[in-house]
Image: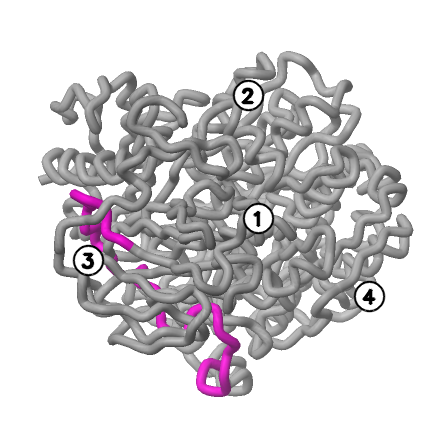
Amino acid sequence: MGRSGEREVDHGTRRLPEESLAAPLPAQPVADLGTAVGHVVQVDDADELTGPADSPGQRVAAAPSLTDDGGHEGARVDASVGDGDGGPLLDVRILARTEDGVDVVLDGDAEFQAFGAQDHGEHAGHATASAGPSLNRPAGPGGTVAVRRLPGAAASACHNVCMNTRAGTPATAEDLIDVEQLVSAYSSIEPDPADPAQRVSFGTSGHRGSALTGSFNENHIAATTQAIVEYRAAQGITGPLFIGADTHALSAPALTTALAVLVGNGVDVRVDEFGDFVPTPALSLAIIEYNAAGPDGLADGIVVTPSHNPPADGGFKYNPPHGGPADTDATGWIADRANALLEGGLAGVNRAEPSGVATHDFRTGYVKALASIIDVDAIRRSGIRIGADPLGGASVNYWAAIAEEYGLDITVVNPSVDPQWAFMTLDWDGKIRMDPSSPSAMASLVARRDEFDLLTGNDADADRHGIVTPDAGLMNPNHFLAVAIDYLLSHRPQWPATAAVGKTLVSSSIIDRVVAAHDRRLLEVPVGFKWFVPGLSDGSVVFGGEESAGASFLRQDGRVWTTDKDGILLCLLAAEIRAVTGSSPSELYRTLTERFGDPVYQRIDAPAGGAQKAALTRLSPDNVRADELAGDPITAILTEAPGNGAAIGGIKVCTERAWFAARPSGTEDVYKIYAESFGGPEHLGRVQDEAKALVDDAIG
């Protein structure tokens, strides 16, 4: 037995409170659950939803309820509870009953947030648990799986994040875009600059939109490219402009438009030597290495990509001479000038036939340089089997080249490139989205986790990573960031001792504890990878990572690598970690939780109109009247990032064991609440409830 009120359970080294195990709950109404998929538990309209873990079932009405893997290795459970119409999302706890009758709460895996959501930045409402690996006795045939509403659990606003009934299932013909129609719309639809939705607008990752909605069309790209030409001239940037594109259907015609404008303006533009797709990190590295070589005139670049966005979208982003994402001073000027050109009917846009364009071997340069940042010899010696899934993106030919160059056992598990992405499983909302941090989008890869020592995924431009291990499935990005930082700070002796570790302020605070344990300085910045660019460039930041599965770090000797996110690099780092330590990254994360605590993290959305969102961006600490959060004294109220003093566009409130941050959405009438607690899922619920009340009170 453990301390008073606790029962010791074979669940790693965690001890679970007595009341969280098998105590009956008072009857409470439960929202309708959705039609079950695969093997499910029987579901009744009651507060306790329970049934045999190994029997098929049916029911009930809107979002998927419970699925398991048919009793294989115990109970693997997915849960999403909502009314399917944007109504309340229940906070749930998932339990498995072992063959000897012990109920165990499945919230100990690195993969699972018991509060009803495994959050990967935007997947609230989805939970994944695996009983088998964390229990030495499986919840096999004859056991049960149960979902119970927590006493006093919050009914958080689901708003557009309720799980679609088909999430994680293969795409069908009805899900696929008409590529011919989409490409035709690129040139046939002329955007109306009087419509705000059809103007050029740079977010944190460039201009994005769809040709079908008049938000990503030939005129946008012609105007934006001309604006970039004029911007670089004004900045004295006279070297070559490197340009590359990903595999989205709109990327090829947009690349052709951009080349015509660049050539028409006499820019020394460089395209891929093999006509291959170009990952964002490969282009970033090309810029940095060209400028480091010291020839006359600085280089910059353009990447044609909407990243992990759905197949109908296009994207266009500018990387200045530092190689990373452009700051708002550049993107604001470029967008304003592009919109002026649109309003003027493209008068002043110069074009010419894009022939005789110079080339650059992005792939070879990137692949050969990897030995300077990754211990590829250790990976090769270990003989670990790696399965790499480019998710139909720009890294498809890079993985094969990496395997050949270094003699690594890498299998490209899906080498297909299809602008419809017909091979994908659907994301949480039923859309095709190439997000390697999404359990739904990565479902087909996770299903193969027993075939390899490590599986990895990248998005369409390879700036994001997904890590799949045999023992835990898809890792939460926050968890892998913590493991990566802990490992690198122990295995990169040439890194400058005074350099900081960077994270965005909505990333997990277990990173804070890891960094402090290594006597390193933490650099906490607003959302956006651009904030890490100065430090990565001059070596004052050894690692920069954000919660949405994007990161980069310095070479082994402390020199700059890329100043944009590098998903390929982080996947190879996971392989190095497995090779050197003999443990999977998910096993190492569980070790970190034994040292630093086991945080529960989730993002939810709350409704907010335009005036309320504007008010949120203007909040000051004086607007917060509370002095406690979820029973703990408030230790900090932030409207500026502590790492660099930049405005966070919202507010962050901290206690010793929890925090929340609220930021307005740039695309929807909601604000986002990121929250984390080291006090367990019920405490996280209190944090979320009080966060929403606090913010609503402050913004009116």
What type is the residue that disc 2 sits on?
A: Val
Residue 42: % across, % down: 32, 70
- Using the numbered discs, state the Cα–Cα distance from disc 3 to disc 2 in whole angstroms: 42 Å
Cα–Cα gap, marks 1 and 3: 28 Å
Question: Badge 1 is on which residue?
Answer: 133
Q: Are marks 1 and 2 in contact (CB under 8 Å)?
A: no
Residue lying at 21% horizontally and 66% vertically, measured from the top left: 83
In terms of sequence position, does the residue under pointer 1 or pointer 4 come before the other? Answer: 1
Earlier sequence position, callout 4 versus callout 3: 3
Give the quarter of the figure containing the C terminus: top left
As drawn, is 89 to the left or to the right of 498? Answer: left
Nearer the observer: mark 4 or 3; the answer is: 3
- What span is colored magenta in the figure? 148-176
Kind of residue at disc 4: Phe
Question: Judging from the image, what secondary structure is the residue with disc 2 in?
Answer: helix
Q: Which of marks 4 and 2 is in front?
A: 2
Marks 1/4: CA–CA distance:
45 Å
Quadrant of the rendered image containing residue 418: bottom right
Q: Whole-Å distance between the Cαs marked 4 and 2?
A: 42 Å
Question: From this viewpoint, is residue 340 visible?
Answer: no
Residue 138 visible to the viewer = yes
**Secondary structure of residue under mark 3:** loop
Q: Name the residue under label 3.
A: 47
Q: What separation in Å lies between label 4 and label 3 (alpha carbons)? A: 60 Å
